[in-house]
Image (spheres, grey):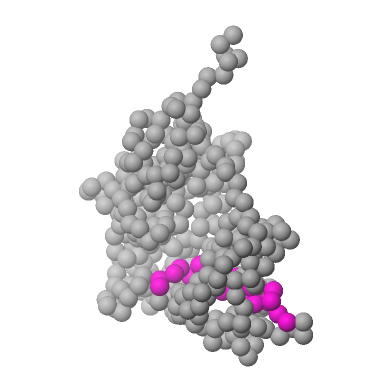
């Protein structure tokens, strides 16, 4: 299951049924409050609540009554995880997300030890990442109209190694034209890092920021113009939400309602929209590989290592906590310790 996906309407109805039950309204409210206190994203919050509802539904009594999770424990969690792996045949990442949601419920909200978890665990596949060649990257960029938004997205993915959501969430203040660098705020694991700002992106980025400035001024004139701010910045600096430097570099096409506060704001462009644009460019380029926005990140790392960059440097640029995560790219190098020449070519 993708933690970034909103709840399906059917699941929303199912969640609502649990919320309206005698036992659960306070529980789910406690879960949401705790997650917001710990600064979890709205996507993770939705996913965790969904898994908790599924877990409670799975352990309903024979007469259909809900059981409070305090009356359940480790064996019940293990049974649910086994059900996901064996009967539902979910992926390892999906099962792991369900486990994280339930452990969070017991340890952070209920302050209980769930005990030993012995359920069947789905095994994650050990896959080598798909990497584009230099020529394939060039073909995709050429398939994007000059000056287009999709071209800038592809150049940022490949030129900086940023993740999809990291690009979508860029704010004006994080772009440093003088130092030729981009500050990635609250990346995976809530870590900040600095990535290089490619020279060929400078002018397209200036043009994009000017378009965003015009849109922001239009929003202000219409009585809007505020943007979501992380943590307590909005309370500490009430006027900051309307300042241009806090606006997203790539704003959404329309103003929407904040799912938590109900405020009308212009959020950043939705990642699904970016994915569709990139996929269309890949098809136009005639690339017969399964290419996503993340493929450019894989290519960024691999090509840096091919050019002789130190793996620790690449680790820092990618924002990996452990160098072993970065080591996966050594398996796709054309040269190096994992590279061999086929004996057929020696004949």
Q: Quadrant of the C terminus?
A: top right
Q: How many marks?
A: 0
Report the front residue among 83 and 213: 83
- Is residue 197 at all visible to an observer of this figure? no
Q: Main secondary structure of the magenta part?
A: helix
Q: Quadrant of the N terminus?
A: bottom right
**In the image, residue 59 lies in the stretch drawn in magenta:** yes
Image side of residue 61 versus residue 223, left or right: right
Say which residue appears at 30% left-offset and 50% top-offset: 194
**In the image, residue 42 lies in the stretch drawn in magenta:** yes
- State the image coordinates of residue 59 (x, y, percent, origin top left): 69, 76
Say which residue appears at 50% left-offset and 78% top-offset: 112
Tell me which segment is drawn in magenta.
Answer: 38-61
Image side of residue 78 versus residue 115, left or right: right
The answer to whether residue 323 is above or below residue 14 is above
Say which residue appears at 34% left-offset and 41% top-offset: 312
- Is residue 205 at all visible to an observer of this figure? yes
- Return the residue found at the far right: 63
- State the image coordinates of residue 64 (x, y, percent, origin top left): 74, 83
- Return the residue found at the far bottom: 22
- Return the residue found at the far front: 116
Say which residue appears at 43% left-offset and 27% top-offset: 336
- State the image coordinates of residue 109 (x, y, percent, origin top left): 48, 79
- State the image coordinates of residue 291 (x, y, percent, origin top left): 56, 42
Image side of residue 39 versus residue 79, left or right: left
């Amino acid at each position: 299951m993708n933690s970034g996906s909103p709840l399906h309407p059917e699941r929303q109805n199912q969640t609502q049924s649990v919320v309206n039950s005698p036992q659960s309204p306070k529980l789910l409210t406690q879960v949401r409050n705790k997650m917001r206190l710990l600064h979890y994203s709205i996507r993770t919050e939705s996913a965790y609540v969904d898994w908790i509802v599924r877990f409670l539904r799975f352990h309903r009594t024979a007469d259909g009554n809900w059981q409070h999770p305090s009356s359940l424990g480790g064996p019940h969690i293990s049974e649910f995880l086994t059900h996901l792996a064996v009967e539902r045949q979910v992926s390892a990442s999906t099962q792991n997300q369900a486990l994280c949601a339930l452990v969070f419920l017991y340890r952070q909200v209920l302050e209980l030890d769930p005990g030993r978890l012995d359920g069947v665990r789905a095994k994650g596949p050990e896959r080598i990442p798909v990497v584009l060649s230099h020529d394939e990257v060039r073909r995709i960029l050429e398939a994007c109209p000059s000056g287009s938004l999709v071209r800038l997205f592809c150049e940022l993915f490949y030129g900086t190694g940023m993740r999809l959501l990291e690009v979508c969430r860029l704010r004006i203040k994080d772009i440093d034209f003088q130092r030729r660098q981009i500050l990635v705020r609250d990346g995976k694991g809530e870590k900040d890092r600095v990535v290089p700002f490619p020279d060929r992106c400078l002018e397209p980025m200036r043009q994009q920021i000017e378009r965003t400035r015009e849109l922001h001024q239009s929003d202000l004139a219409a009585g809007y113009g505020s943007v979501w701010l992380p943590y307590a910045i909005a309370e500490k600096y009430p006027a900051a939400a309307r300042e241009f430097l806090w606006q997203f570099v790539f704003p959404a096409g329309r103003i929407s309602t904040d799912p938590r506060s109900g405020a009308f704001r212009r959020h950043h462009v939705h990642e699904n929209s970016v994915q569709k644009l990139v996929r269309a460019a890949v098809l136009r380029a005639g690339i017969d590989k399964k290419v996503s926005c993340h493929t450019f990140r894989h290519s960024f790392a691999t090509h840096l290592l091919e050019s002789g960059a130190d793996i620790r440097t690449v680790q820092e640029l990618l924002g990996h906590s452990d160098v072993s995560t970065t080591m996966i790219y050594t398996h796709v190098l054309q040269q190096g310790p994992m590279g061999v020449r086929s004996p057929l070519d020696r004949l």
